[in-house]
Amino acid sequence: MSYSQQKSGHERFPYAMYNNTLGIHQVVHPHHINDHPSFVMPISSAPNSSIQYSGSTSHGAEKFVPMDISQYNKDGSSTVMFQVNTERNSLSIPLEKCLQPGGGAHLKDAQEIMFPTVDRTQVQTFKLVIAWPGYDTVEFPIDIGTNEQPITRADLARQIAYHFFGFFIQCDNGYLTQSSLFKWKVGGRDGYKFHQIRLSTFWNIEGTSWAASVRVPENAS
């Protein structure tokens, strides 16, 4: 299973090479995500009907996924927020919305340039660190573009969502296995599904290493 390159003004991320590195070969398009058996929650097993995908961005109470990452840059100055543009006081956006064609339409300030002070002749890639509870920490590349074509908030959200989708696939296929904290299980019939995950912030750990704060429904586990 592989992930096709998303259509946007920013298309430098090497999706084909990344898929090949993971040994992923079957193409999956964004609109197929909800049909993938790993991420569909049957109505009979859903703890709450609001957890099922409905095409809406409405949601109830949420909780942060407690990733085991130490933040060395603590002043909060290097933090990107993601909010639904049609919701007052929005604190997050569904990751699957970020992957869908035209997903930027759901995102507040979608076309704002990210990391405007970074000289992209020196740095073109950040590392997204995912330290999901109970799983080994993994890293994924975030292409921040060039000085002539820097990444936008929508582009950044799309890449983050793409990598979380890949992470969920690897967990569901057994490539990544859980060793503890089993209430945070990913995939399968009793684990978290991709469509339940909401992106809140992207924050700097240290140097070029970054993490994404994500939320899940309070009653999802």
Image (tube, rainbow, N blue to C red):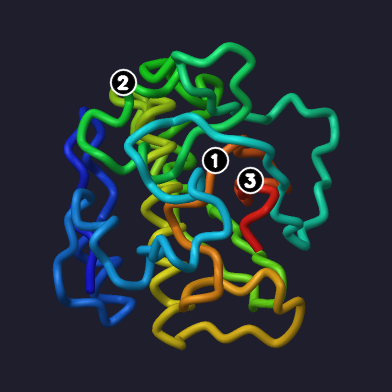
Are circles 2 and 3 on residues that touch, CB within 8 Å? no
Q: Which type of secondary structure does the marked residue at label 2 adopt? A: helix
Q: Which mark is residue 199?
A: 1
Residue 45, how many percent across, how many down?
49, 68
Residue 168, how many percent across, how many down?
45, 68
Is 124 in front, or is 183?
Answer: 183
Residue 60, how many percent across, how many down?
62, 36
Residue 77, how many percent across, how many down?
74, 24
Within the image, what quadrant is residue 43 found in? bottom left
| Above or below, comparing residue 29 to residue 2 in the picture | above
Which mark sits nearer the N-terminus, 2 or 1? 2
Which residue is drawn at the image coordinates 37% and 29% (left, top)? 154
Q: Which type of secondary structure does the marked residue at label 3 adopt? A: strand
What's under tag 1, amino acid-wise?
Leu
Within the image, what quadrant is residue 14 found in? bottom left
Q: Is residue 126 visible?
A: no
Which residue is drawn at the image coordinates 31% and 76% (left, top)? 21
Which mark sits nearer the N-terminus, 2 or 3? 2
Which residue is drawn at the image coordinates 21% and 28% (left, top)? 9
Q: Which mark is residue 160?
A: none
**Left or right: 142 as drawn, with respect to 92:** left
Q: Which type of secondary structure does the marked residue at label 1 adopt? A: strand
Which mark sits nearer the N-terminus, 3 or 1? 1
- Name the front one of labels 3 and 1: 3
Question: Disc 3 designates what residue?
Answer: 215
| Above or below, comparing residue 177 to residue 93 in the picture | below
Question: Disc 2 designates what residue?
Answer: 105
What's under tag 2, amino acid-wise?
Ala
